[in-house]
Image (cartoon, rainbow, N blue to C red):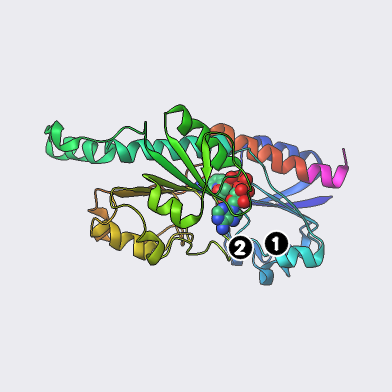
Amino acid sequence: MVHVLVTGKIAQEGLDILQEFGRVTVVENPSEEDIAPILPTVDAVLHKIGKLPRELLLRGPGIQIIARHGVGLDDLDLEYLKEKGIKLTITEDANSHAVAEFTVTLMLVLNRRLFEAHEKLIKQGFWQREQLIGQELQGQVLGLIGFGRIGKRVALLAQNLGMKIMVHDPFLKEVPPGATLVGLDELLTGSDIISIHCPLTSETKNLLNTERLGLLKPTAYLVNTARGGIIDEKALFTMLKEKRLAGAALDVFSVEPPSLSSELQTLSNLIVTPHISAMTHSAQRNMAIMAAREIKKFFLGG
Ligand code: NAD
């Protein structure tokens, strides 16, 4: 019987598919120590959370397929998978809607100063409306770093809100009508809002470092729902403290959960969420079903 390790809590619909043909071990909050003793008998991994470095994967010589619950591959040693011929699948587009909608939500929340207004009213009874004037998205320039499944959906939503779109994606030669393909520096200097939708790789690690962050307009907003590590967080927090940037919304961090200092808690121009862009019921269900079906197809065919 096929033994499937599931890293993280997944939707029941995905577990039902796996249990039709396999023995399933779910580790809801996987640490390397939890997973290591299970791996020697594992044939397949449905991978949702946690890191799977080479040293750990070596403990599971029988692993034939890793089905990623999601699309990010930065937690996996891809070289090792290639060397060993281990099949890798992703749940393409299962969460794109969820992440795109969440990204646009963050753009709106930043521009209308929603959290600041809520905090001030609920804690201080603050009712000085002219001190909470925000901006419409209509007419603003949105700069998208990465124009794959999620970037394209964000562009579509933003265009419907009347935004102009700039794109930086070194792997693209053209973009659809209404968007302009530009170099990274041009995007950073010319955008009113910058949103990141590229993977975390050795090329994109610290892509937005001190120097590049310094190119942003002081009135700009920055949104990251892709991966922590693409932005130099320390440099960003300094800029926010010194008001050299209008604001930022981060759903992802270089280390998760992040340790956010009490100083950051006082900033009214920073919004943080605990990696929940893809946390909708339908996205979670779709990802679990798609990943489980990939494993089933691999072992049973069809
Ligand atoms: P995708 O592969 O469809 O698109 C990624 C795009 O980034 C591609 O077009 C690629 O050419 C581009 N790219 C690669 N290197 C680049 C670089 N150096 N600069 C600019 N662009 C570059 O992926 P997707 O489905 O759109 O997802 C994008 C990323 O979002 C994923 O890699 C993942 O890390 C992240 N993500 C986060 C969540 C979340 O819960 N917060 C959920 C899903 C995806």
Displayed quadrant of residue 122: top left
Farthest-out residue, bottom:
55
Residues packed near mark 1 inside 10 Å, few (<14), some (14 to 19) or many (20 plus): some
State the residue lying farthest toward the right: 301
Find out whether the residues at labels 1 and 2 contact each other: C-beta distance under 8 Å: yes
Q: Residue at x 40, y 40 (%)?
A: 141
Residue type at numbered disc 1: Ile
Q: Nearer the viewer, residue 145 or 48?
A: 145
Residue 297 highlighted magenta (yes or no): yes
Provide the residue span drawn in magenta.
Answer: 295-302
Residue 8 visible? The answer is no
Q: CA distance from mark 1 to mark 2?
A: 8 Å
Three-letter code for the amino acid on which mark 2 is drawn: Asp
Secondary structure found at label 2: helix
Find disc 2 in the rendering and name its residue: 34
Q: Residue at x 67, y 65 (%)?
A: 77
- Whether residue 215 is in magenta: the answer is no
Q: Label 1: which residue? A: 38
Numbered label attached to residue 88: none
Measuring from the top left, give residue 14's x and y in whole percent: 68, 39
- Secondary structure mainly formed by the magenta segment: helix
Local packing at callout 2 (Cα closer than 10 Å; few below 14, some 14-19, many 20+) is few
Q: Please state if 109 lies on the left or on the right of 283 as rendered.
A: left
Q: Position of residue 209 (x, y in %)?
A: 42, 65
Mark 1 secondary-structure assignment: loop
